[in-house]
Structures are given as structure tokens and as C-alpha cells.
Image (spheres, rainbow, N blue to C red):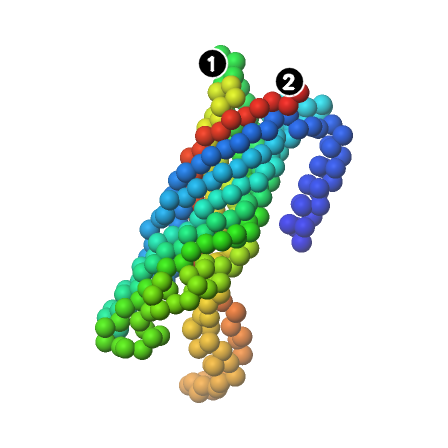
Amino acid sequence: MMKKILLLLALVFMMQSAAKAQFVDYGVRLGNGISYVSDDLLTHSPIFGFNLGAYADYMFTDWKNPWSENIYLQFGLNINRRGTNFRQILANQHSIRRGFYHNWYAQIPVIAGYRFEIASLPAGNIVSFYFGPTFNVGLFGRLWDRQVTPGMAQYSYNYDTYVTGSKDDRRSFKHIRRLDASLILGVGYQWHNFTFDFFMDHGFVALMKREDVLANLDQTQVGTTTTTTGGTTTNTTKPKDRNAYTGTNHAFMLAIGYQIPINR
């Protein structure tokens, strides 16, 4: 409920300030870095991440506030590459599984930031701090998933999406969720029209849905009766519908860009 109230207040604030605000800059940004998927069940190593985007800055230039020249909103559209390398060793089965996800997304960020000019340096040296949510839609991607189990000949234990699988088996978004939400948190430096950024992109949505074996075990225990020294106890606790897969997208990016003022 509190989140809904805060969102409503933010929307009202933006609507009331619209007449006193304008777009002041637009620019492009190219970034590279590491991207990985964090999951409790699979070990992982990062892949080469990529980020290309265009944006526009919206400032409250006529706002009767001493910070009107510092606070800004940024809207844009990014094309980014996210994914991970994964590896799993099943010691009891003498089995090894490894592969990768290489996924491309269209990303819509809504960023709030604060920037200021460094007083001790010549004009044109600006530092900024920013954060905000993003909405991501999967465009296309590749999956390689290979498992080898010498002691078991079944296809369920031995497979390779590029050998035994079909084209759909190699398409990432046939196996993972296409929609994602994340948070961007970053710091930037601007020298005249050139920009340099370092930011973190932290995902919140698990990429796939997997049944939790422990939750299923708990479910079978609901309603059972056990005898103790003091009497009998009936289990009436209903387990939560947990997702066994916790992997979400994460990235750390370095970016360079060029910004152009509007009507200046």
C-alpha cells in the first residue's frame, strides 16, 4: 500500500511540474562490461556485456528551488546484451553440465539524477549520480546447454542443444522469461559534451520457473498427524509456492557517450 501511495505522489508531482520543465539535452551512450546470472544452484562466470542507448534529459529549469539546475530525469531506449556461462557438476551421477546464455534486450529506463559542476575546475566539468528502474523486453538470444553422464545412456542425462536439440532448443527465450525489471545505479563524469559512466544494472525477476522439491515435500506433510509425549500434533502449515531458480540478470558497465544541448 505504501508503495502505491509513493508512486501516486510522484506522478502528481511530475504532472504539477510539467509546465515548469523541459528537455535540455539528448545524447548517445556506448558501454561494455561484464554480465552474469546469479543462481544458488549453478556456478557461473560472466560473459561480455554490451549496452547501446539514446536518451534525453528533462530538467525543472523554472522550478523555484535552489536545486532546479541540479536535479534531472532521464528517459531513453537501450539495446543491451546480458547472460552468463554456467557449469554444474553432479558428483553422485558422475555428470557434468555446462553452457551459456547470450540474450539481447530492449530496455526502457526512467532515471532520476543529481549533477553538479566541479567548482575547483574550469567550466564544463560535471559529476552526476543517478538511479532508477528499467523495463526490459527480450528480443532474441542463444542458449547452449550440454550435459554428459557416462554412466547413464538416457537422452535425459546426455544432450547438447547444438547437436541433439532443435532450433527452438537453442533459442534462449523459449526457455526463460522474456520480460524483466531491473534497477540502474551509477555515477558519471562529463567533460564538455563527452560523458563517461560507470553503472550497475541489477535484475529482480528470476529468469525461469522451476519447482522447489522441498516445497513439494512440505506439501505432502500438510494434514499429517504425529504422536508426541504430550499428545498428538497435526501439521496445518501450508508451504509457500517457492521458485527453486533464483537467477537474475546482473551487469557492471563502463560507458562513453556524447551529449548535445537543446536550444543552447
Image location of residue 148, percent across then percent down? 27, 68
Given residues 167 and 106, the one toward you in this image is 167
Given residues 72 and 79, the one toward you in this image is 79
Image location of residue 29, percent across then percent down? 50, 33
Instruction: Judge left or right: residue 84 versus residue 115.
Output: left
Image location of residue 177, percent across then percent down? 51, 59
The image quadrant that residue 263 belongs to is top right
Q: Is residue 146 above or below residue 258?
A: below
Q: Badge 2: how crowded within 10 Å, few (<14), some, or many (20+)?
A: few
Q: In this view, does 72 lie above or below 38?
A: above
Residue type, label 2: Arg
Residue type, label 1: Leu
On the question of residue 77 being in view, the answer is yes
Instruction: Kindly state the secondary structure of the residue where label 1 is placed.
Output: loop
Q: Residue at x 57, y 24 (%)?
A: 260
Q: Residue at x 54, y 75 (%)?
A: 238
Q: Name the residue under label 1.
A: 121
Instruction: Judge left or right: residue 32 versus residue 204.
Output: left
Q: Name the residue under label 2.
A: 264
The C terminus is located in which quarter?
A: top right
Q: Residue at x 71, y 37 (%)?
A: 14
